Image (cartoon, rainbow, N blue to C red):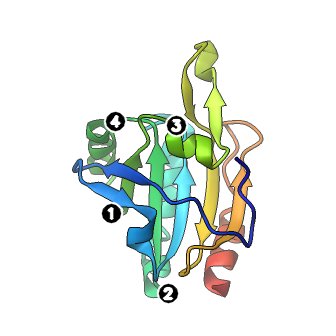
Amino acid sequence: MAIVIGQPAPDFTLHETLKQQRSLRDFRGRIVVLAFFPGAFTPVCTTEMCALRDRLDRFGSINAEIVGITVDPPFVQAAWKAAHDVGYTFLSDYDRSVVTAYGVAFRGLGGMEGYVCANRAVTVVDKEGIVRYHWIGEHLGVEPDYDAIDAVVAAL
């Protein structure tokens, strides 16, 4: 499925680090920055998630929320969040349904044939659930343009 700017974001329900279920619709009324990343405890992912963490106060002041999504299990995400003092939501797409629905599935990480993880991608969803920004990395080592994300969020 292709994500289309100006169209509704596909809804989903995933497990949070505390293993509670959270849906995209739970965030309705807030701007949501969906940050897809390949895996916890990897260098580029850690840099990216911490760069987003450092924007948390600014985003929170304008009713925006960051949601990290990876295929890692909830307990791995919880350990990563604790290790890096991250205060935003992480969701586990362990069945790969959301990375598939958002068109950000990455196959063959590290040459592991058959392994599917999230590509590095960012989708910004407005307060009404409409996609306003969608970026997919050219390869896993490319971080998003944080200034572009800031600008989109600030404009909403």
Which is nearer the N-term, disc 1 or disc 2?
2
Type of amino acid under label 3: Pro
Q: Which residue is mark 4?
A: 73
Q: Quadrant of the C terminus?
A: bottom right
Q: Where residue 49 appears, x then y in whole percent?
A: 49, 53
Q: Where residue 61 appears, x then y in whole percent?
A: 44, 86
Under circle 2, the secondary element is: loop
Under circle 4, the secondary element is: loop
Label 1 crowd (10 A; few <14 / some 14-19 / many >=20): few
Mark 1 and mark 4: span between their CA atoms? 18 Å
Under circle 1, the secondary element is: loop
Label 3 with label 1: CB-CB less than 8 Å: no
Which numbered dot is residue 62? 2
Which is nearer the N-term, disc 3 or disc 2?
3
Label 1 with label 2: CB-CB less than 8 Å: no
Which is nearer the N-term, disc 3 or disc 1?
3
**Residue shown at 64% from the left, 50% from the top:** 121
Q: Which residue is mark 3?
A: 43
Type of amino acid under label 2: Ile
Which numbered dot is residue 87? 1
